[in-house]
Amino acid sequence: MEFRQTEFLHTSVLLEETIEYLNVKPDGVYVDGTLGGGGHAYQVCRRLGKQGRLLGMDQDAAAIAAAGERLLPFGEKAMVVRGNYEQMKEAAEAAGFGKVDGILLDLGVSSYQLDDPGRGFTYRSDDAPLDMRMDQRQSRTAKDIVNTYSERELYRVIRDYGEDRFAKNIARHIVQAREKKVIETAGELNAIIRSSIPAKVRATGGHPSKRTFQAIRIELNRELEVLTESLDDMIELLAPGGRLCIITFHSLEDRIVKSTFKKNENPCTCPSDFPVCVCGAVSKGRVVTRKPVLPGEAEMEGNPRSKSAKLRVFERGGME
């Protein structure tokens, strides 16, 4: 099975809106925790003066190579490191950054990752291997999850991360199929999923594999776990007035971002009938976007993958 390496292409979603909300200062310090092809980072660097700096992070080697080349014209203003954004605090310290003026996360899977069958993210290529690793340095792949997780574990993953109402049926069919043969390709998994969903539902819904593939990818790359555990630290990393801009692509991510921003804005745990706060919890700042910022009609027409994107922004308050 051979796949041609594709060029790293990714259309930056909500680009103008994100840059506007970041409030880029010429002498500011910024971190892009999901560098991708460097589209957002390029626009940040364009607005930086001689003292301004940007640290770009990504765990995907192809993204690091593509973004590194794209940001070359900015010289020492742009620093690119390979790593997961959960290591942002350590990476910022290593770069000599103190508090930062802005942080950006674009949590979408890149067009390159989706369109290159060899990466195994897609359900649209039957010969694609079940890989789905964001960071190819890790040994575990989607194939391992599909072939080693118990029926109960598979049900939990597909139910919680895919929000598929046929999760139990899909998990059962996967376990039955792998008893006869190891499941190795997207096509094999597609056939199993298809047989688990009633024909009437398949005829009216989108691709039957979409939710299951999303669920396995999230589980493999610990996407929601990393997001949940990193948000508070990123807010702590911001300087007063600094902003955290996060673009999500499904409701699971968006709920985590929304609730964490709300908690940091109003961390008080006192009962609602208390006349004054006695818990001592102090607000870390304010939610700038009461409702998420959505792509406009023109962007959705030009880039259908932007349709589910939502941008939320948090601004760090002054510190005592």
Image (cartoon, rainbow, N blue to C red):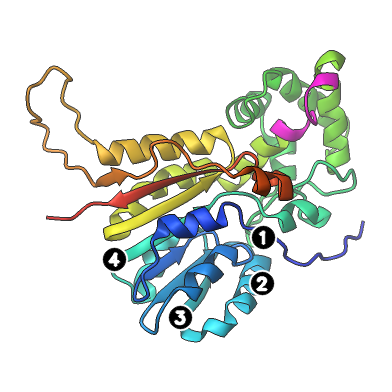
Vertical placement of residue 225 versus 117, above or below: above
* Residue that badge 2 annotates: 66
- Amino acid type, residue under disc 4 in the picture: Lys
Say which element carries label 2: helix
- Amino acid type, residue under disc 1 in the picture: Gln
Question: For the magenta stretch, what is the residue range?
Answer: 203-211
Is 89 colored magenta in this rendering? no
* Residue that badge 3 annotates: 77
Mark number displayed over residue 192: none
Say which element carries label 1: loop
Q: Position of residue 172 (x, y in %)?
A: 75, 21
Which residue is farthest right? 1
* Residue that badge 4 annotates: 99
Q: Position of residue 56 (x, y in %)?
A: 50, 68
Q: Is residue 50 left or right of residue 218?
A: left
Query: Dividing the image into 4 quarters, which one contains the N terminus?
Result: bottom right
